[in-house]
Image (cartoon, rainbow, N blue to C red):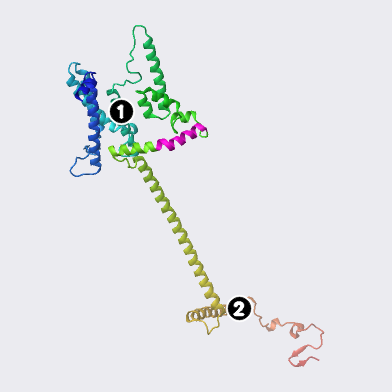
Amino acid sequence: MIEMFDERIVATGRLPLFGFFVAFIITFVLTRINVRLIRANVRWWFRNITAGDLHIHHVVFGVVLMLLGGVASLAVPDAYVGLDLVAAAVFGMGSALVLDEFALILHLSDVYWTEKGRASVDAVFVAIAVTGLLLLGIRPLGYEGIAPDPGTGVLTRVYVASLAVNLVFAVVTLLKGKIWTGLIGLFVPALLIVGAIRVARPGSPWSRWRYDPDSRKYQRAVRRERMFRRPLIRAKIWVQEFIAGRHDLIPPELLQRRAEAAEGARRRRLARAERRAAARAGRRAAARAERRSGRRSGRRGARRTAPEGERGPLAQRTAGIWAERRSGARAGSRTFSRTRRKAASRTRTRAVPRRRRPGPEEAPPPEERTGSPAGTSGAVDEPGRASP
């Protein structure tokens, strides 16, 4: 085992890469254990690092460690293999901390324990796979044992041509939504050929650009997604959650939308309740007014139609009051009429001049005294006696 390690790692100069690989895996595992214990709210474990109300994510420490490790690896001479190994290990620790919160950097939101947070685990798995392939001596976009030939240049042209073809296949595979096939195909070019030929995944850029929703290729892609890829995705999610914990929290933006929707629904319910209460109060007021008017009209009709003896005390008292008022009004009108007639007759009497008795010197002529014209027979001088 030690001889194999010396031959495959130390002799080939991959010892710093091995230190990076081991430090990366150990840091990722310890980080996930730490955050899972913090999430479980274990009393005897550490808590989140905060500065006042600010939560300091471990990606900050990862960036600092990556900077230190990268600068140290560049500054250390090649002869100091031990220092180079330490710098690579520090860089691996920082890379693990950064990639563990890759989803936070991608979405610019704290989605660590949400469904979007699985992107961080995917990024860590990709980094582990690529580093492991490099440790095995597999070179990306090339073949083992093929190197540029400065003499004839034939091998150089073959290498460049294969490199260009592999890059094209890798881009097509990634556009078809096959991330793992494209990344591993950089080391195993045969996978790039398979990924570029097969149909794209539904929802991928290649599917949106090239496939019609009613085309046979799109229907075949949907069928393959349902039959083959979804079981693989469920298995991958099970492995991820077994290692990194369950990502079952609701995203903050979804929580905000749900809160806004709940508030809008509450306001609509209150508005409906207020409208119903107002309509109910209006109906009750109308019913009360109708009953009141009905009772009034019924009492009035009963007072008009009921005999005098059958009326109640209140009705009789009210009828007596109205009768007294009517009799008083009639008596007043009669008194007023008599007074008015007396005043009118008095006024007429004052307006007619009284007759004065004539004196001796003002004796009326015989016809005026007798009260008939001259020469008229049958004039009456005295009552009961006729003139001759």
Q: Is mark 2 on a helix, strand or loop?
A: helix
318 sits left or right of 178 in the view: right
Which residue does the numbered mark 2 point to in the structure image? 341
Disc 1 to disc 2, C-alpha distance: 132 Å
Q: Residue at x 41, y 22 (%)?
A: 169
Please tell me the numbered disc located at residue 195. none
Type of amino acid at the residue the image marks with label 2: Arg
Q: Which amino acid does label 1 sit on?
A: Ala
Q: Is residue 297 above or below residue 131?
A: below
Q: In this view, does 65 lie to the left or right of 143?
A: left
Assign a secondary structure to mark 1: helix
Classed neighbour count for the residue bearing mark 2: other residues with Cα under 10 Å, few (<14), some (14–19), many (≥20): few
Q: Is residue 320 magenta?
A: no
Q: Which residue is drawn at 25% across and 36% down?
A: 32
State which quarter of the image contains the N terminus. top left
- Mark drawn on residue 129: 1
In-front residue for pair 253/200? 200
Q: Quadrant of residue 128?
A: top left
What span is in magenta?
215-230
Image location of residue 386, percent across then percent down: 78, 91
Residue 128 in the figure: left or right of residue 194: left
Vertical position of residue 381 compared to residue 150: above or below: below
Looking at this view, is 343 or 41 the one in front? 41
Quadrant of the snapshot with the C terminus: bottom right
Name the main secondary structure of what is drawn in magenta.
helix
Residue 247, located in which quarter of the rendered image? top left
